[in-house]
Image: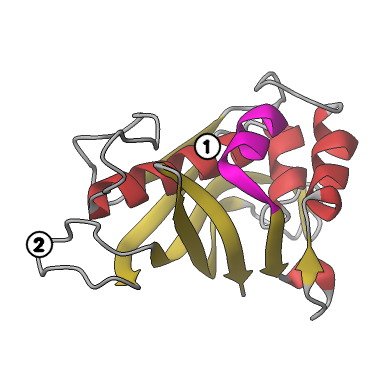
Amino acid sequence: MSGKWRSRYAAQSEHDGDDPTTASGKFTTADVISANQKLLDAISRCDYHTYNELCADNLTAFEPESNGMLICGKRFHKFYFELYGGGDNNGSGTGQDAAAATSLSSDKVGSQSTTSEINITMSNPHVRWLGGGCCSDGCGDGSAAVISYVRMDQSVVNSSSDDDKGGPVTRLCSETRVWENRDGRLVHVHFHKS
């Protein structure tokens, strides 16, 4: 597969691209969305360095790739970065590398091969604050935040057989990710993908 990966979320934030740290230790809902988007961008680029910085060493996860088993730590995930991105990749992976690493979009869709740019959208992200209470304006007084959304991966595929026509494909999955406020940093500690 050739092409580029793009990641974005449906409701853009004024904090897009900001570092998920703050001196006050308080975060906004927009900060959580921005940190989550930074994580998705790192995954789509096979950028393990950024992924590693954003995730706790004791990250836990349930995802289709684990066949229902609880994954503890980052070693399971690093395997895919190394397999498709060449190790401690700093974002120089190809679209094909990213497709394989995310496991949602592979370089093959049935008998069709993806040949164009892949667009990743975090649709309708919803953030809920946990612990410490938070006012209704999303001030981030909680010690953790849960973000839930539908992830949409869009691509165009070419047919590899005469009876398949190819065309646009959208793959959806539901993701829930937990971010903790640790010493004035947002740290990704758990996710569930289905």
Is 49 one of the magenta-colored residues? yes
Quadrant of the rendering where the N terminus is positioned: top right
Which residue is located at x 59 percent, y 35 percent? Answer: 42
- Rendered location of residue 46, percent (x, y): 70, 33
Residue 2: tell me if it is visible. Answer: no
In the displayed structure image, the side of residue 189 where residue 123 appears, left or right? left
Which of the pair 161/135 is nearer the observer?
135
- Magenta stretch prevailing secondary structure: helix
Horizontal and vertical percent position of residue 30: 25, 48
Q: At numbered mark 1, what does the secondary structure look like: helix, strand or loop?
A: helix
Circle on res. 137: 2
Mark 1 belongs to which amino acid? Answer: Asp
Protein image colouring: secondary structure
Which mark lies nearer to you, 1 or 2?
2
Please state which amino acid type lies under the numbered disc 2: Asp
Q: Residue, x 63% and y 41% (percent of image)?
A: 43
Of residues 152 and 56, the one drawn nearer to the viewer in this rendering: 56
Give the number of the disc on residue 117.
none
Q: Count the marks: how many?
A: 2
Q: Is residue 134 magenta?
A: no
On screen, residue 79 above or below 103: above
Q: Which residues are magenta?
A: 47-57
- In which quadrant of the rendered view does residue 97 lie? top right
Q: Provide the residue designation for mark 1.
A: 41
In the picture provided, is 110 more to the left or to the right than 118? right
Of helix, strand and loop, which one carries label 2?
A: loop
